[in-house]
Amino acid sequence: MKKWDAVVIGSGHNGLVNACYLQRAGLDVLVVEKNEWIGGAAVSRELTDGFLYSNCSYVCSLFRPEIMRDLELPRHGLQVIPYEGGAVFTQDGDHLGAHRDHHAHRRAFARFSKRDAEAYERYARDVTRQCRFIQPLLMRTAPDPARLRPRDVSELLYLGRKFAGLSAEEMALTMRFWTMSISDFLDEYFESDVVKSYLAISGIIGTALGPMSPGTAYVLLHHYMGEVDGSVGAWGFARGGMGAVTQALAKSFRESGGTIRTEAEVDRVLVDTQGAKGVVLAGGEEIRADRVVSNADVKRTFLKLVERSDLPDPFVRDVERFKMRGSSGKLNIALDSMPEFPALPPNSPCVRGDMHFTDSIERMERGYDDWKAGRWSADPILDMVIPTTLDPTMAPPGKHFMSCFVQYCPPKVEGRDWTSADRDAFADTVISQIADYSPGFRERIVHMEVRTPRELEDEVGLTEGNIFQGELTFDQLLFNRPVPGYAQYRSPIGGLYICGSSTHPGGGVMGAPGRNAAAEILRDAKRPNKQMSPAHEVL
Amino acid sequence: MMARNTVETNTAPVSDVFGKSGPLRLETPFHPRIAALMHTHAWYDWSGYLSAHSLWDEELEYFAIRSQAALFDLSPMVKYRIEGPDAEAFCDRLTLRDVTRLKPLRVQYTAWCDDAGEVIDDGTLFRLSETRFRLCCQERHLPWLLDGAIGFDVAIEEETEAIAGLALQGPTSFAVLQAAGFGEIGSLKPFGIAEFAHEGGRVTISRTGFTGDLGYELFVDAGDALSLWDRLWEAGRLHGLNAIGFGALDRARIEAGFLIANVDFVTVDAALRADRARMPDEIGLGWLVDMKKERFNGRRAIEAARAKGANRHVLVGLEIEGNVPAEHAIVYHRKKREAGIVTAAIWSPMLKRNIAIASLQRPYGDTVTDDLWVEIYALHELRYVKLMKRARIVERPFLKLDRRRATPPGGF
Ligand SMILES: Cc1cc2nc3c(=O)[nH]c(=O)nc-3n(C[C@H](O)[C@H](O)[C@H](O)COP(=O)(O)OP(=O)(O)OC[C@H]3O[C@@H](n4cnc5c(N)ncnc54)[C@H](O)[C@@H]3O)c2cc1C
């Protein structure tokens, strides 16, 4: 029976990044994926003729350029196109436009508040300063304060020195960012409700918290620490949808000799007294490997794929307590023609960016109230983009793919399981909101895919449908992610690693967890790791 | 008492101060259309023409080239019409490549030298028929061409103003041409030329460009320029057609590894310092030199330099670690010895690599190719961060796209 050097459970982008680095370092790696397709939450599928959807994730910024370069992803077809614009439509028929041009942006804000328009400068400075502080941490394994081996000490010192290097004012700001609600945080800068709601959206996306919940200021940062070609905080579309990321990874992996098996669901990890020995597939097939790397989330990995008796109890209880609450849904819509938005001027660039219909923090918070009560928001918060305005590959000329991310959507409906009728009613709530601002919208729809936490869990394997494989609250970050003592991609079982978004530095299509995990695995395997180039320095 | 100067004010329109030689900056035949799309007012001067550096957002214009389609006004490019029974012989004598093998309706990228073998310019030579050529280039060379034509039965005419040119580049450029009624262009291979009827006149379309992407160049009489623009613009509505300026094109051309005269090398006519002139071998154009041709300008000198190993420079593509573009940085060997200079550099969005074109002094880039470094001065908020970054010599073009060559081309 063949014995692999490593088997990776799951072909999400982190699993593939991990597999690529291991394979390039000379290990013989097998990736097993339960679905017929690869990609996890970074996937593009053609569900209706001629239209390609970004079924889950839809915009790209966090994915580290160092990884794209190391793994030669551009050559394997990955191309990221930055987008411009964006808008919040207001209930009185107006809109707040967002623009890449600094002064156009300022003047658009000034229509709502001259003060806010100029306050944006300091806000942008402060956010950027924080991103500059966090960015260098992304591609490093967090220290383990409980173990304090020499490298933990030096890593803690690194963190300490970084922190000590801040001015008193910056330190205060950092603490505020890590702890405050996005609503309170924005109140320190802005007065206009529309401006605040536009900026607050990044603080609640994918998070089971409202804009008034402490911790959401950090979630906003998490969405700003990416870049497109050096523009920090910019977002773009992967040409061909987010599946282009994982397709390129798969090509790179196969080219370097790696093997991927789809429709191969892991039932459990094989463990003996010495540690992980391989996996058993759902059909009973055993696959032997020297090490097992799980790309599945931390709950799925340790609560479903490993026997409880193989794990120390405190660890299991920490994993159980890890917060993974589903809070989002998504509509993927094939459109017969470009929707109209009468609030926008003709040829407005805003349609090429992210569009929203929630014009006050109050409305956002009410949307969250519904989630707490176990209902989807009656007045949902949408993050809507039309990638085909810049990407000709996803729909026929003149037709469009619209991606519509929806906050909030509960993992269970008033405590019971989702039904298909619930799902349709949820979709209708969303469509109605769009149609309020875009006459004739319904008539343009030729096909639609509706995803609630139920579909996200069943299909992608995201527990409760949590899009980040675990909430990005500060108690679950750095050396606490996923659980204290196990933030270095290892587990209580020797040879069993985790590499998905449940680990530091967290969710989003970033690749850093997969890459950092590979560095740790290669360190354990005492293999040179020349393929991994150093992270770009933040100048 | 203060003296009072009386200055006579000139009340004539600004544009008239040069009288019959026209305004300070000429407008190209496409000017009304470009002006209507010009949001940034980022005009620049291209050989005396008012040209767009960017119209909207340079970075997004670059991505139009790489994801959709981009329309670029190249009318200011200098064009010469070379016609007559001896046109082929003349061009063959003038340029480095074998023109007798350039079939009608084909294009050659080429260069030409003076008798010392030093490069006068590079450009594209279009063979429009058995006896008619068009030479397109950056600089002006009429005396050189006319003097060289003595003894050939050939007429040479500068036709820059008379002929309007457009570059249509990007993955949907074929789809745009198809929608504009030029669908037969599908069978055209790279460097091919086709002619189509347009508004009672003709439009010449070649599968050429400066981007390394799928793309075409279109030439018409200046009088037909606007109707051609409109035809393409209307056809491009559903194919993401964008007007772009030079800034975007420049990024694309670096990825494609193309040179610009007097940016990446100094042309011999522009060189005030004689040692700045370059032979083809010194600027990566050695491959153009066809030594099987018995006679062409510069042949003897090039041959002698090759025999003696006298070429002093090498032009290379570099990949530099990190993500800070190394524009005009000095290249070092072992971080110490000066080895050359970077002439053009960008962070390549398509490759996610930091790339550069550099001119090195031999033996660097020739027999000594390892341990090369560039020193980058990154100025941030009034402090230089000095970076010494490792540079590796890599092949040009940096970017190779299958869609550039695919025939028939795809829709995107
Ligand atoms: C709807 C939605 C929208 C999002 N939008 C964005 C966005 O726009 N931008 C962004 O950056 N991020 C976004 N995210 C977050 C981002 O997509 C995820 O954080 C990221 O893709 C997770 O990647 P991963 O590799 O860590 O894990 P996953 O993508 O979750 O991959 C895990 C893989 O493991 C497989 N698997 C699980 N169990 C088993 C088993 N037992 N056997 C075999 N295989 C198994 C799964 O099928 C899956 O392929 C979004 C997420 C969702 C769900």
Image (cartoon, helix red, strand yellow):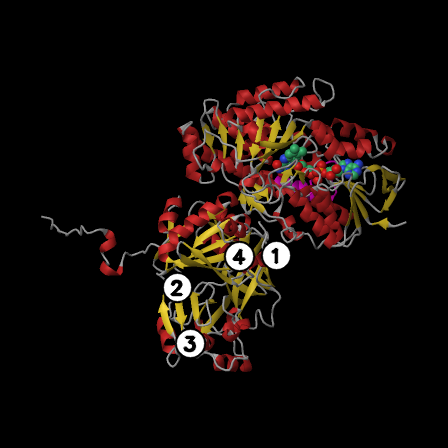
Mark 1: amino acid? Asp
- What is the distance, in whole Å, between disc 2 and disc 1 at their CAs? 30 Å
Indicate left or right for B101 with B199 as reference: right
Evaluate if marks 3 and 1 touch, with contact meaning CB atoms under 8 Å apart: no
Mark 2: amino acid? Val
Q: Position of residue A245 (x, y in %)?
A: 65, 45
Q: Nearer the viewer, mark 3 or mark 1?
A: 3
Label 1 environment density (alpha carbons within 10 Å; few <14, some 14–19, many ≥20): few
Q: Earlier in the sequence, mark 4 or mark 1?
A: 4
Evaluate if marks 2 and 3 touch, with contact meaning CB atoms under 8 Å apart: no
For disc 2, the chain is B
Which residue, given by chain and number where applicable, does mark 1 sit on? Answer: B402
Mark 4: amino acid? Ile
Instruction: Look at the numbered disc 1 and give the secondary structure of its residue.
Output: helix
Q: Position of residue A95 (x, y in %)?
A: 46, 28
Q: Earlier in the sequence, mark 4 or mark 2?
A: 2
Asked if the magenta segment contains residue A149, the reply would be yes
Which residue, given by chain and number where applicable, does mark 3 sit on? Answer: B85
Which residue, given by chain and number where applicable, does mark 2 sit on? Answer: B78
Q: Position of residue B223 (x, y in %)?
A: 35, 56
